[in-house]
Image (cartoon, rainbow, N blue to C red):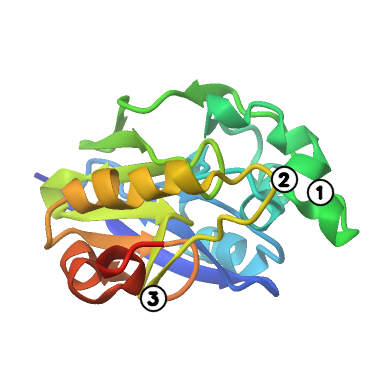
Amino acid sequence: MPTPTITTFTLGDFQTNCFVITVPESADPSRCWIVDCGYEPEPLLDHIERSGLHPVAILLTHAHSDHIAGVDATLSRFGALPIYLHEAERDFCSTPMLNLSGMLGRPVTCKEPDHYLRGGETLEFNGTSWRTVHAPGHSPGCTLFIHDASKQAVVGDTLFADSIGRIDFPTSNPEDMRHTIHEVMMSLPDDLVIHPGHGPATTIGRERASNPFVTGGF
């Protein structure tokens, strides 16, 4: 089975982790996915261009502004690309107050997605299969993209190293987040490497053992 490579770019003032996913052992290793694309996306976009990569889709873990602010710049650089987002955030890309940029006084909008997810889909990419998992709480449409075969996942602003995503935004839901952390995230295997939307990569096992929001609740 080919193994995907997840390359992290930490973008903008919010230090948002955005990702380029490739499959070097595939028939066409130049194809890539972009997962989230935030403020000041030039390092990510320049890397794609410099490496001779060809984006084939943009996947959004959720549609807060620090994860979508670079989407239109990506489309301007590389042309039309399909965009995937959970259906619970159907209006977020076009509504600054929903994507939180309106609260910051820096309104952000971007192209509406082409494909709306519900969770439970399988997305095929260059010989690899990824499953989507709905993980609401931080925002209503937070989605995990999990590659079980290589024990890797991109998890957005759900679970961080020693922390969790904020639950005090207008569209956050603390009860949903408790379910996501304790029932969804903690049902995943200990050796799964998770790539969060902020901070370093970690593993489910590490967070199960030491994350205070897992061990002590919230």
Asked if disc 3 and disc 1 are in contact, CB closer than 8 Å, the reply is no
- Secondary structure at badge 3 equals loop
Mark 3 / mark 1, whichever is N-terminal: 1
The residue where tag 1 is placed is: 108
What residue lies at 44% left-to-right and 41% top-to-bottom? 176
Q: Quadrant of the C terminus?
A: bottom left
Find the distance from the CA under tag 1 to the CA under tag 2: 8 Å
Find the distance from the CA under tag 3 to the CA under tag 1: 26 Å
Decide which of 159, 26 is in the foreground and name it: 159
Asked if disc 3 and disc 2 are in contact, CB closer than 8 Å, the reply is no
Asked if disc 1 and disc 2 are in contact, CB closer than 8 Å, the reply is yes
Q: Amino acid at mark 3?
A: Pro
Q: Mark 1, residues whose alpha carbon is within 10 Å: few (<14), some, or many (≥20)?
A: many
- x and y percent of residue 195 in the render? 36, 62
* Residue extending farthest left: 1
Q: Is residue 190 left or right of residue 112?
A: left
- x and y percent of residue 14 in the render? 65, 71
- x and y percent of residue 31 in the render? 39, 44
